[in-house]
Amino acid sequence: MVRNLVTKLEETFLSLLLVAMTLLVFAEVIMRFGFNSGIHWAQEMTLLLAAWFVLYGASYGIKVGAHIGVDVFVKLLPRNAHRFFTLVAIALCLVYSGLLLYGSWIYLSKMKMIGIELEDMPIPKWTAMSILVIGFAMLIVRFLQLGWKVLTNQAEGFGMTDEAEESMEIAKELKAMEEQEKLEKDRKDSDKEDRS
């Protein structure tokens, strides 16, 4: 129940970020080309919204297994080796995310200490860019959750999207539709011949 609520909240937040970014860009284009004016803070806000969307969305992508990966070699390995290399990959992702989290913390601390504001809006830069710390912290949490699932045999790997497999499924569906259309056309032609 709580897990579903958290997932819905995450999806809603990501949707709101995407909608806000799209509407802001649309309004800016209308203002610029329709009325020869513009919103002076629109570009900076769009970049911030995009950063929030990407950094927050990266952790959500780990949660739902939406990231694209190349795992052809790993899938060929025996189960224990597959599990081992998955755990190694998760450990490397944790190290990478940890380094970026540490660097983000230092960067935002300096921005707060200096007191720099955004160029076009009177908002402290560290506040607007706090997604750096939030996003990498969430990535660490997601990788830890995934690591636990792999250790407890609840998951076999990252659960990445397999584009090749999806493409083959789409090709099979298209072929089946073409065959169905051909059968229907042949049936209509034979019905016409029977009538004449």
Image (tube, rainbow, N blue to C red):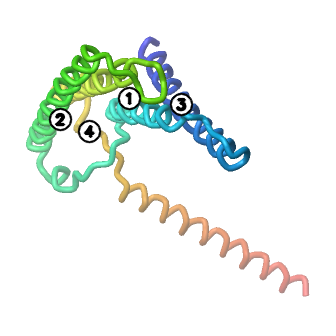
Q: Is residue 167 above or below residue 86?
A: below
Give coordinates of residue 103: x percent, y percent. Answer: 18, 27
| Measured Cα–Cα span from mark 4 to mark 2 | 11 Å
* Amino acid type shown at disc 3: Ser
Could you tell which of marks 1 and 3 lies nearer the N-terminus? 3
Rounded to the nearest angstrom, the CA distance separating label 2 from label 1 is: 16 Å
Instruction: For the residues labelled 4 and 2, say whether their Cβ atoms are less than 8 Å apart.
Output: no
Q: Which mark is residue 158?
A: 4
Residue type for callout 2: Cys
With 47 as the anchor, is 59 left or right in this view? left
Q: Which residue is mark 2?
A: 93
Rounded to the nearest angstrom, the CA distance separating label 3 from label 2 is 26 Å
Residue 125 circle label: none
Of marks 1 and 4, the one in the foreground: 1
The secondary structure type at the circle numbered 4 is loop
N-terminal-most mark, 1 or 4: 1
Asked if 181 appears above or below 21 in the picture, the reply is: below
Q: Nearer the viewer, mark 2 or mark 1?
A: 1
Query: Against 196, is 62 above or below?
Result: above
Q: Which mark is residue 56?
A: 1
- Circle nearer the N terminus (4, 3): 3
Depth check, front residue: 3 or 139: 139
Chain-order first, disc 2 or disc 1: 1
Compared to 169, does 96 lie above or below?
Answer: above
**For the point 28% across and 15% down, which residue is it?**
112
Q: Which mark is residue 15?
A: 3
**Image point (46%, 12%), residue name:** 1
